[in-house]
Amino acid sequence: MVIDYATQIIILPFVGIKKGNSGSKEANFGYIFGEDSYQGGIKISQQYTGYNNSWFYIPATLRTVKITNETALNYGAFQNCSMLISITINSGAKNNVGTKAFENTVAPTWI
């Protein structure tokens, strides 16, 4: 994981706890930042499996996400990440995207 606070970007190999993970909150983007409040974090809700949801705190200054080696995106993976202006994801995950993965979030660019 690379976090560059000066340019407000994070580069990750996959979303959540492991590559290709789905069906649990550990497959959501917010999971990597946690469920505990901290200064500078924005509280957001992200669903998983269609009916469960969790509250995560994501850095308010984060603007760009790059995912380099994912194979699947969970239901609600980036849901409600309205602070983001750019999400770039490797094309290996393009055909396995869960419902609401980008709800209330910028559309991804596939590379």
Image: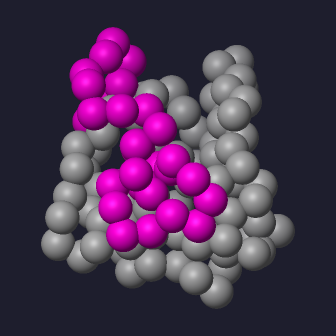
Percent from the top left, x then y, of residue 70?
A: 68, 63
Quarter of the image where one finds residue 9: top right
Q: Which residue occupies the extreme top position in the image?
A: 39
Q: Which residue occupies the extreme right position in the image?
A: 111
What segment carries the magenta color?
16-43
Q: Is residue 4 left or right of residue 43?
A: right
Quarter occupied by the C terminus: bottom right
Quarter occupied by the N terminus: top right
- The answer to whether any part of residue 86 appears in the image is no
Percent from the top left, x then y, of residue 100?
A: 37, 74
Q: Is residue 3 left or right of residue 78?
A: right
Query: For residue 58: magenta?
Result: no
Q: Residue at horizontal 30%, vertical 39%? A: 56
Q: Which residue occupies the extreme left position in the image?
A: 51
Q: Is residue 45 left or right of residue 101?
A: left
Percent from the top left, x then y, of residue 55?
A: 23, 43
- The answer to whether any part of residue 7 appears in the image is yes
Vertical placement of residue 89 versus 84, above or below: below
Percent from the top left, x then y, of residue 3?
A: 67, 27
Query: For residue 21: magenta?
Result: yes
Q: Residue at horizontal 43%, vertical 32%? A: 33
Q: Which residue occupies the extreme bottom position in the image?
A: 95
Q: Residue at horizontal 54%, vertical 33%? A: 62
Q: Is residue 42 left or right of residue 14?
A: left
Q: Which is nearer the eye, 19 or 11?
A: 19
Q: Which is nearer the eye, 44 or 49?
A: 49
Vertical placement of residue 74 versus 4, above or below: below
Q: Residue at horizontal 71%, vertical 41%? A: 11
Quarter of the image where one finds residue 22: bottom left
Quarter of the image where one finds residue 109: bottom right
